Amino acid sequence: MVLRSTYGATALLSSLLALAMIAALFLGYAPLSVGAVFQGLVGQGDERYVFIVQDIRLPRILLGAMVGGSLGLAGAAIQGLLRNPLADPSVIGVSSSAGLGAVVAIYYGFAATSAVIVPIFAITFAITAMLVLVWLAGKDASVLTLILAGVAISSLAAALTSLAMNMSPNPFSLNDIILWLLGSLANRSFTEVWIAGPFMAAGGVLLLLTARALPALSLGEDAAATLGIDLRRVRLQTIFGAAFAVGGGVAVSGAIGFVGLVAPHLVRPLVGHDPGRLLLPSALAGALLLVLADIGVRVIPGDTELKLGVVTALLGAPFFLWLIIYTRRTMR
């Protein structure tokens, strides 16, 4: 049965997300019993269980939900703004710019001084890139201008990242850059939660505030303007909301691809194609996807843990190809 209710979809996805997060507490390299997890949560009993639950698994699970939710929400908002179902946060260059900031911090050795340096650099570069995007696009930017400016910024950030890797002063620095770019939630702590959380929350609020304007934009910019929509305000809210939300996420997880693209498409059958109603369910779907992907990373046997960005790319790329073929067929 197709659920055409935002409330119904939100309740369903919230329940699934809660179940996935609870299951993630039990699953990993060291499977824990119900009693061990409970003891770990309340800080009593065996110190090993307390450490595993409170210092390893809990922050990892929370970050997975936060990063996935930010990516899903930003993806839905950008698709609504650009009126393009194939768009995601990488289109406007925010993901690659945040990644460049982190790479710069690692390349120059700043990352070794404090755990907060990489997130600060990543978020700063993401916001700076969005300021450049707004300047390049101009006051009354069209959708095409935004896309072209975003592609230019994304390409430049990717080129500078490659240059940093090429000119890396030592193999250890290069290894750190590569591992970070592959994306992972391993070895994250509550420090990263408190650093990136406020930025992701602020970005989420800005993106959710566009919910009333995005449906009008689906009619076209001229029609939206006649309905009283302030197009410039909506563009700025979406761009900077994505910068805060995605920049904060990339700052602590590295490059995680395809979640922002896939999540909105998974929930469209549940809530329809209204871009405003799609925002919150997409955030929940993105959070659910990343928590499940991270569970898979932890339980797949092997001597080396797969990187989360690799898993999402392996799952997302075939979906993207299918989406292109499906979109082409429906346009005939």
Image (spheres, helix red, strand yellow):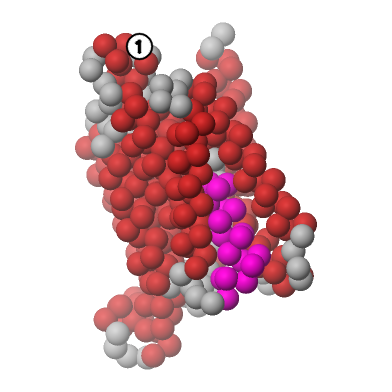
Q: Position of residue 199 (x, y in %)?
A: 36, 55
Count of marks overlaid on the render = 1
The amino acid type, in three-letter code, at marker 1 is: Asp
Q: Is residue 271 visible?
A: no
Query: Quadrant where the C terminus lies?
Result: top right
Tag 1 residue: 222
Quick one: 291 or 67, which is closer to the camera? 67
Quick one: 288 or 38, which is closer to the camera? 288
Quick one: 252 or 236, which is closer to the camera? 236
| Residue ID at (30%, 16%) | 224
Q: Is residue 99 magenta?
A: yes
Q: Position of residue 109 (x, y in %)?
A: 62, 71
Outermost residue, top side? 332
Query: Quadrant where the N terminus lies?
Result: top left
| Residue ID at (43%, 55%) | 248
Magenta segment's dominant SS is helix
| Residue ID at (48%, 47%) | 128
Q: Is residue 70 visible?
A: yes
Q: Quadrant of residue 42?
A: bottom left
- Name the side, left or right, on which 6 lies relative to 57: left
Q: Quadrant of residue 326?
A: top right
Q: With respect to residue 143, does 203 lie above or below? A: below
Please report the bounds of the magenta region as a residue range.
95-112
Q: Position of residue 292 (x, y in %)?
A: 46, 55
- Name the side, left or right, on which 3 lies relative to 257: left
SS class of the residue under badge 1?
helix
